[in-house]
């Protein structure tokens, strides 16, 4: 791996950038690996990176059905924050946020993490009380989150309308200043490059079609579209297709897959300095460095793998955007798309073992997996490497649906998070 | 937006309906007798198939009645809708 530095950039600048090597190899699958990761999105590639970098396990394959970063890693709205209500979630997302802060340096790859602040708007007395409760809970957990009056919201985000004539007037907001955005492709490519340089094989166009089991029932390998691969440990990180992949091992999960849509506008000059989300009216907006407004819509009400959702879902979100930011009423939307998100009943992820020995799963990130990428990958790598969960992901077991120890962010946040 | 055929009212736009998740999940007849895992499976575990799916719908802004539907989750096209209490039709063939 050739490192990026000011000298290497300058040298390449004088060489018309023709000297850069490929960022990762495209190897043939080997017959046997210590660990196989199923799913080449950012969570899966990050897991492979941390396995190699922190736990010294380099005989690892990442198997990807399509191309890396082609699923939800390339379909999200790139928002990062950690102001979750419950202690378990706060610890997990804060772990991720701390890793985000130094990730570009660690990977030697610019992830374009930008702590521009995430502002969540309150539109009712209930919102105000709930957000203040979140703020106090966050502060007890050492996570920054502060209350802004409507005027302070307006000062922080000048595009925002705080008119009392609005259908749902802004009554204040909760601001996490360390929240922000990062570049979704860069995180995929940065992890891929880092993992590959440490010996991890990234194998694209390789779908896992089945699992083979040893006599004692534990995992002995995976069957793929590119042949059989032996391994004793498999980590499934397949997002919306987790039910499908684990169904091939005979498992049923507390998951449902829904389409979640997003859209971007035509690119314009910098007009929007932060991230604003409003759960009550369902608006979710930021501006990419390319200049497009990036808008997140809600999930459809039915399970689907179609990677597209109903138009009324996006138009509902745009209604709210136009109400909150009247200056965007004449903006044109360029593209919209859908990703398939796997949602658990309590809206918290499942990270850990399955009933099958040697088979681990990291799923259920629902509508909010991007922000957690480094933390999710790190604790999952720990789990795969040691066979026991990291203290941070210990509460996020599959077994919690049996014991009843749910981490009910669904009740805490009510909508997309 | 989906066009959904309510077995009572006919074809109506999706915004008149509320999705109710997977159909034909029977509540254990003697809840005290089942173990925690079976109860968790009843409450939370879902088949979530990529393909043909039997699911419940409520015509909330119409007749107000529940019914079942068989839909393909890849194409989102409905194969059939049928009344509560009727058995799941044998709709295993894929239609695009």
Image (cartoon, rainbow, N blue to C red):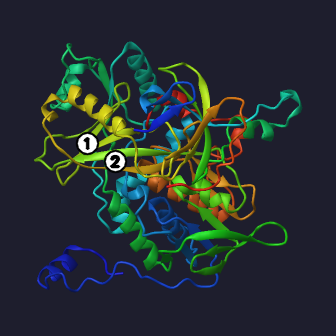
Q: Kindly report the distance in space between the C-alpha atoms of the residues bearing marks 2 and 1.
A: 8 Å
Residue at image x 89%, y 31%?
B33
User: In the image shown, does A268 or A200 lie closer to the viewer?
Assistant: A268
Q: Is residue A81 above or below residue A411?
A: below
Q: Chain of mark 1?
A: A
Residue at image x 42%, y 29%?
B15
Residue at image x 16%, y 43%?
A332
Q: Is residue A150 above or below residue A384?
A: above
Residue A407 visible to an observer of this rendering: no
Quadrant in which the C terminus of chain A is drawn: top left
Would you name the residue on which mark 2 appears?
A77
Would you name the residue on which mark 1 appears?
A286
Q: Chain of mark 2?
A: A
Crowd class of label 2 (few under 14; some 14 to 19; many from 20; radius 10 Å) = many
A308 relative to A360 in the view: left or right: left
Residue A136 visible to an observer of this rendering: yes
**Contact check, label 2 and label 1, Cβ < 8 Å:** yes
């Amino acid at each position: 791996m050739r490192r990026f530095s000011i000298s290497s950039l300058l040298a390449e600048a004088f060489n018309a950038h023709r000297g850069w090597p490929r960022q990762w190899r495209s190897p043939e699958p080997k017959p046997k690996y210590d660990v196989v990761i199923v799913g080449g999105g950012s969570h899966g590639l990050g897991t492979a990176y941390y396995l190699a970098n922190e736990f010294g396990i380099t005989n690892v394959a990442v198997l990807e059905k399509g191309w890396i970063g082609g699923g939800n890693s390339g379909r999200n709205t790139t928002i990062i924050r950690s102001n979750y209500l419950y202690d378990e979630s706060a610890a997990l997302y804060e772990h991720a946020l701390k890793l985000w802060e130094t990730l570009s340096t660690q990977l030697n790859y610019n992830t374009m993490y930008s702590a521009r602040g995430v502002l969540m708007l309150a539109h009712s007395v209930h919102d105000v009380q709930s957000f203040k409760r979140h703020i106090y809970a966050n502060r007890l957990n050492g996570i920054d989150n502060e209350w802004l009056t409507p005027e302070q919201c307006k000062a922080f985000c000048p595009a925002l309308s705080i008119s009392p004539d609005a259908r749902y007037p802004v009554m204040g907001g909760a601001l996490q200043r360390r929240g922000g955005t990062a570049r979704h492709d860069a995180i995929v490519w940065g992890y891929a490059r880092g993992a590959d340089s440490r010996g991890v094989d990234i194998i694209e166009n390789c779908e896992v079609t089945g699992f083979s089991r040893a006599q004692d029932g534990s995992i002995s390998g995976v069957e793929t579209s590119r042949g059989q691969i032996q391994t004793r440990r498999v980590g499934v990180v397949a997002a919306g297709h987790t039910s499908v992949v684990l169904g091939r091992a005979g498992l049923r999960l507390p998951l449902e897959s829904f389409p979640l849509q997003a859209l971007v506008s035509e690119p314009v000059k910098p007009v929007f300095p932060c991230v604003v989300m409003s759960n009550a009216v369902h608006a979710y907006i930021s501006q990419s460095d390319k200049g497009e407004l990036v808008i997140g819509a809600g999930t459809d009400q039915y399970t689907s793998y179609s990677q597209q959702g109903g138009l009324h879902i996006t138009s509902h979100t745009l209604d709210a955007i136009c109400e909150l930011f009247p200056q965007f009423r004449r903006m044109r939307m360029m593209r919209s798309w859908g990703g398939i998100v796997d949602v658990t009943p309590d809206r918290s992820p499942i990270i850990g073992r399955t009933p099958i020995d040697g088979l681990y799963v990291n799923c259920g990130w629902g509508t909010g997996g991007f922000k957690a990428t480094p933390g999710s990958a790190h604790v999952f790598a720990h789990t795969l490497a040691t066979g026991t969960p990291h203290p941070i992901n210990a509460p996020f077991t599959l077994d919690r649906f049996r014991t009843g120890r749910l981490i009910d962010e669904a009740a805490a946040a009510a909508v997309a998070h | 937006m989906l066009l959904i055929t309510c077995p009572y009212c006919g074809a109506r736009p999706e915004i008149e309906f509320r999705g109710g998740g997977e159909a034909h999940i029977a509540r254990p007849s003697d809840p005290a007798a089942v173990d925690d895992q079976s109860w968790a499976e009843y409450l939370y575990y879902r088949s979530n198939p990529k393909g043909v799916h039997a699911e419940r719908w409520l015509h909330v802004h119409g007749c107000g009645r529940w019914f079942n539907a068989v839909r393909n989750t890849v194409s989102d096209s409905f194969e059939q809708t049928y009344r509560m209490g009727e058995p799941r039709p044998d709709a295993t063939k894929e239609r695009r």
